[in-house]
Structures are given as structure tokens and as C-alpha cells.
Amino acid sequence: MTHPALTASDRYLTRGELILVLNCGSSSIKFALFDAGQTPLPRDPVWNGKVQGIGGPSPTYGETGMTPVPVRLEGSNPYSAALRRIEQGVLARLGSRKLHSVAHRVVHGGSKYFSSIRANTDVLADLKSYIPLAPLHQPFALEAIEALLHERPDLPQIACFDTAFHHTIERVEKLLPLPCTAWDEGLRRYGFHGLSYHYQSIALPQRHGALAQGRVIVAHLGSGASLCGMQDAKSIATTMGFSALDGLMMGTRTGAIDPGVVLYLQEIKRLSPEAIGQMLYHQSGLLGVSGSSSEPRVLLPMESQEDVQGERARDALALYVRRIVREIGALIAVLGGLDLLVFTAGVGEHSAEIRKRVCAAFGYLGITIDAAANEGNAAVISGKDSSITVGVEPTNEEWIAAREALALLS
């Protein structure tokens, strides 16, 4: 498959070097090119796409203006093959342009990295030590960094951390109720989805003005899910903690769970740590409770079924919404009230029904929803008589990563 070099028919003419952003998950890689020659950095990429289903039977490759197509990821390491496929597409798209840098979304920066940093072998070694804290994402981002450091040592690799945005939260929010030595060992609440929340801290004041500087809760609801309470566009509290397992119920992850359950699985059921990890990360959440799907859009039509499958779908969605409502209530208490509630990420941006059910639970606070605006995924979905503004704001993690790279290397 060949691809034309960038031309005037693209979204806009590029004016300078291009920043490549890689957002690596366990079974997918999102990629995007941003034009570093324009000021300010455009929020829309020149070109982007995604490889999905890595490691599965039917991986696909899709890019701007192209329907995803099956792709062969040959060799013993399909992830490396996916990276090579993206590299081919990037090279074909560069034309006469040069790469300015590669920005990577890295989930965990631990207690050492509080802002984006240029990666080298020493940084890479540090970040590998955090793999147990984010096993679904950390190793894959590092694999991409390591491969590119080897192939292009001259090309800057910028690690942008999902934990960094939450370094503004108070110490009391970071502490875990463990023996006091735990803090010194790095056992603390870190928070995640930071690139998404960082974007919201920029986008929301532009859309909502002074309201967004007040008491704000952003609900990042995707396959992974969390909430962030903000004030003055800074993180005050968040639902994810030491790992990306904490907080809300997710697509396949448990969210917060009684640690006694884990002890029971280990001591009574005699499950190995590996089996328990597989259950908590991959077999629980919406998928586990429903027994059929990790996605609300699939489960919602199943609720009307008068069978076991329908009952499980109803249970899964009821628990999913209840956990969101409970955690929003906790953040309202921490913030001392609420001025703006915002939904983002895949479910948050596109599921009007989930938004409606969550907001209905806060009718006692005076929240009302404009049904037509909600169905249309409008920027503001609250009713005119609502005491609290409710919005929908698409996230843009890739732009934040490109912006971080540009600022770091300027």
C-alpha cells in the first residue's frame, strides 16, 4: 500500500517540521502528525490513524480519510510489526518534511517525573521500573521509545506522563492509609488520564470562561474511566490512585474494590497473582458483570431482553452508573460544591443515555438536562433552568503531547 506525500489537499499546508505522537495501548496504537511550523500549534493533526486489534486474530490499520483495513502483523512480536507499519505510513507522508520529534503518552511517571522529559537510556530504565503500576500501557509505550532510540538516536523522544497533571493535588489526597514507610517506597495515589485532563484545563476556560475556573468535575469515561475534580483549572482530586485499577468501574477493570476480595481470591480460591491480575484488569468491570460486553453501546439495547443476558446487562449498567454517581458525589464534597460537570472520552462524548442517567441522580442539586442537546452531544447539555452547567468536551491527548514536545525542545 502506498500513500501520497502531503499536498495542499490535506487539512492545511504544512509549514515546518512535523511532530509524531504515539499513544500506545496494549492492543492498539494511535498515531498523529502535527505541524510544528504553525503558531499556535493547530489542534487538528495533519494526519492521524490507529492500529487496532494488535495480538488478536484480525488487526486493522486505518488513517485519515481511510476505512480501517485488515493488516498483517507478521513475526513473533505483533506489536513491533504494528510500529513498523506506522513507521512506513509516516515516512510515506513526510515528503520533504523532517520529523521534529516523537512524543509518547507514557501512563506512569512515578514519584520522580512531574513533567514531560526527553527520554534516554537512563530515563527508560526508570520508567521500566513502573511497569507493574500500569501493566496495560507502560510496557508498550516504552517498547516504542526503546525501538526509536535504537533506530534514530538523533531524533528526540519526549515522554509525556499521564500522572503529571495530578501533581497539584494535596498531600492528603496522595496518602494511602498504609504504614508510614509506604510513602518513601513510592506507594501513594498518583492519578491518571492526565493528558486528557490537561487538555480540558485549556479547552474548558476557552468555552465556558470564568465558570471553568471554579469547581469543576470532568468525567473521562472510556474503556478506562476516571473523574477529576478541578479548581482554577488544576487537579484537586481524582478517582484513580496508585494504579489505573482504582476508582470507577470500567470496561474490563474493577475500579475500587475491597482489598479483602483480593486476599480471598489468593488465600481461599488459591488463584495465582497472575490469575488475579488477569481477572482485575481484563475480566471484570462491564464485561465481567454483564458476561457479554465491555461497551455501554452494546449493553444498552440488551437491557430490554427478558432473559439472563438482559438481567446481567441491566446489572452491569446500573452498577457502572452508580459508581460514577457515588464518586461524583465524593468529589463535590471535596470541592465544596460544583459549578461545571463535563463528560469526555469515548463513552462520555457519545453516550447520551449514560450521561442522562448520571445527571438524573443529581436532580436534587438542581441539575436538569436538555434532551435534544444531550442527544446531539452538544457542548452544553444542561437545561436553561439547571443550577449547574453540564457539558460535553471532546478530549485531545495527542495535541497535548505534541504541545509538550514543542515546548520542551523550543
Image (spheres, rainbow, N blue to C red):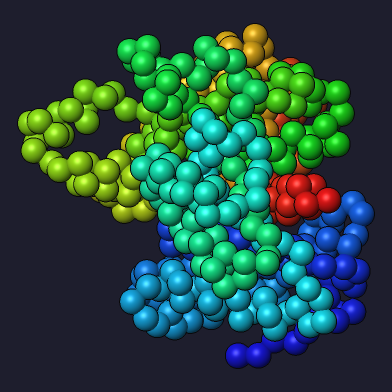
- Quarter assignment of residue 219: top right
Q: Can residue 193 be seen from the camera position used here?
A: no
Asked whether 335 or 384 is in front, the reply is 335
Q: Can residue 111 be seen from the camera position used here?
A: yes
Q: How many marks?
A: 0
On screen, residue 261 above or below 128: above
Q: Quadrant of the N terminus?
A: bottom right
Name the residue at 86% across, 36% down.
206
On screen, residue 221 above or below 362: below
Specify whether 230 is left or right of 276.
right
Name the residue at 44% across, 69% down.
79
On screen, residue 98 above or below 271: below
Residue 235 place in picture, x, y as percent: 65, 25
Name the residue at 64% across, 13% down.
335
Name the residue at 78% across, 73% down.
98
Residue 12 place in picture, x, y as percent: 88, 70
* Residue at the front extreme of this rendering: 122
Asked whether 222 or 196 is in front, the reply is 196
Asked whether 190 or 220 is in front, the reply is 190
Residue 55 place in picture, x, y as percent: 37, 69
- Quarter assignment of residue 229: top right
Asked whether 83 or 348 is in front, the reply is 83
- Quarter assignment of residue 390: top right
* Residue at the bottom extreme of this rendering: 1
Residue 170 place in picture, x, y as percent: 59, 15
Specify whether 158 is left or right of 147.
right
